[in-house]
Amino acid sequence: MKLWDKGTSTDKKIESFTVGKDRELDLFLAPFDVVGTMAHTRMLASVGLLSDKDLGLLLPALKDLYKNTQEGDFQIEEGVEDVHSQVEMELTRKLGDVGKKVHSGRSRNDQVLLDLKLFTRDRLMQVTQSVEQLFAVLQKRSEEHKNDLLPGYTHLQVAMPSSFGLWFGAYAESLVDDMHLMLGAWKITNQNPLGAAAGYGNSFPLDRRLTTELLGFDDLSYNVVYAQMGRGKMERSVAMALSSVASTLSRLAVDACLYMSQNFGFIKLPDEFTTGSSIMPHKKNPDVFELLRARCNRLIDVPQQIAMITGNLPSGYFRDLQLIKEIFIPAFDEILSCLELMTLAVEKMDVVSEIMNNELYKYAFSVEEVNRRVLKGVPFRDAYKQVGLEIEKGKFSPNTSGVQHTHEGSIGNLCNAEIKKKMQDVIGQFSFDRVRDAIGNIIT
């Protein structure tokens, strides 16, 4: 079945090529297509394009379909082009001509725009929750190990004393900035495109504000041409936010791979989190971090892939946009999996204490010694030269005890509470409760 079928047949190879993976990927969109149709039919009834009797038949049938999508009983049948066709066919089978009325005032163009936005909102809520969980674990580990020093590096050369409190806490605050990007992506996503039809509006007296309210959107995409132009732009904006989270995770994974190696020896994972070698019996490999790094690097590339599809398209709809689903939809399961595994790994990670007592790291305390002399009245440049000459002559003897900085965000003053407030302030700007309430009302 095709919603555009006018009685002519399509070459089977052409049909297979143009449908692509739509039937498979549209299963992810099925519950959202049903929810969107519920809102659309209620709006059609409100403007007199459906009778109350028709609406009374359609809504229970749509609720049954929604239940099927939640229980895994919804399928897109062989020969049916996409989820939109399947939903309308199911309604027509059950209700006859009444089922054929639900497409009034819509095009598959604004249907898929709507489905993708509803799907994306749902997944962004899940991603945000997972980011919060990792953030909480990072902050917990930061507080637990705020007094455990480790070397800080610049150019991969030993630089100055750092701490596990700073290390864990740095990645927690990085997630805060990632959530600022996620908030921007949420605001772009949470605008209603329904009513744009094929990108040029409709002669029916549609009430687009009503569907906006019913579906819990913050606002409309008002201009119908721009609503259609938002296809691809929304996905790329969201992908950029996901890639920012992935970048944070990838960098943490790189650190963990280094820190687990014998040359560093700063952290350990439980044996059940590592893998071995088929030839070297001593090996405990950090495969989880290596795969996290690779998977996250793949996610970092998603915005570029979308840009390559959309970069030279004029306004209006083009079938090129269909391919974005193949890149975009799987990205959510990928980032959610990475967040879950990183949270678990950080939670189970063992920290090695007293690392800085090793002779390898004595020069990391050179700045501490320079500053100690400055506090006694020696000009900084003179103190720097004195310590440098002592190091050159092999006479530098560091004081490795009592490294306790006081300024905001330093070893002795991590400001974890302030960073937590920053995260709470960002999360508080998402309209999650409104969305949940709206979807809960429409399906019940």
Image (cartoon, helix red, strand yellow):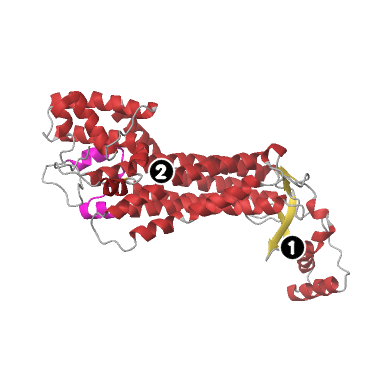
Quadrant of res 55: top left
Residue 200 seen by the camera: yes
The image quadrant that residue 151 belongs to is bottom right
430 over 167 or under it: above or below: above
Secondary structure state at the residue bearing disc 2: loop
> Closer to the observer: label 1 or label 2?
1
Image coordinates for residue 216, horizontal then vertical, percent: 31, 38
Image disc number at residue 430: 2
The spot of residue 146 in percent (x, y) is: 70, 47
* Within-10-Å neighbours for mark 1: few <14, some 14–19, many 20+: some
Q: Amino acid at mark 1?
A: Val
Task: State the residue lying farthest toward the front.
Answer: 12
Disc 2 marks a residue whose amino acid type is Phe
Residue 117 sits above or below residue 395 on the image: above
Tell me what residue is drawn at x 69 percent, y 49 percent: 164
Q: Residue 159: x percent and y percent?
A: 72, 63
Query: What residue is drawn where x is 12% and y is 42%?
Result: 205
Region rendered in magenta: 207-229
CA gap, disc 1 to disc 2? 41 Å
Image: 385 above or below 199: below
Which residue position holds label 1? Answer: 158
